[in-house]
Image (cartoon, rainbow, N blue to C red):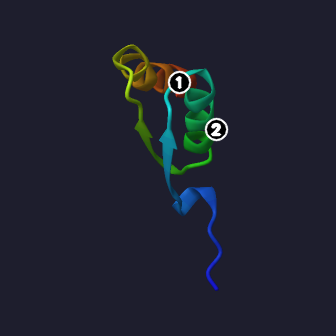
Amino acid sequence: MDSISPANARTVIVGGGTMGAGVAVVLARGGARVTGIELRAAHRERLLPHVRAALRP
């Protein structure tokens, strides 16, 4: 069986609030490809900018 590491994982986060955004950041820092799904427009609009800001050096 092949091992899966975050560097070659594809992930989906359902919910882009505080917790979902935090999980997305952790996974992205580990090298995973992250897709976020959020139904609420306000959370959806903040999700990507939050993750990008958290990943800046």
The amino acid sitting under disc 1 is Arg
Farthest residue, direction bottom: 1
Q: Estimate the x, y position of residue 2 in percent, counting from the top left.
A: 61, 81
In the picture, the disc for residue 26 is 2
The residue lying toward the viewer, choosing from 45 and 7, is: 45
- The N terminus: image quadrant: bottom right
Mark number, residue 56: 1
The secondary structure type at the circle numbered 1 is loop
Q: Crowding at label 1, few (<14), some or many (≥20) Cα neighbours within 10 Å?
A: few
Closer to viewer: mark 1 or mark 2 = 2
Give the residue at x 34% y 18%. Answer: 41
Q: Residue furthest top?
A: 42
Horizontal relation, residue 14 to residue 29: left or right? left
Q: Residue at x 63, y 27 (%)?
A: 19
Q: Is residue 42 above or below residue 37?
A: above
Above or below: residue 44 compared with residue 27: above
Given residues 23 and 30, the one toward you in this image is: 23
x, y percent for residue 10:
48, 57
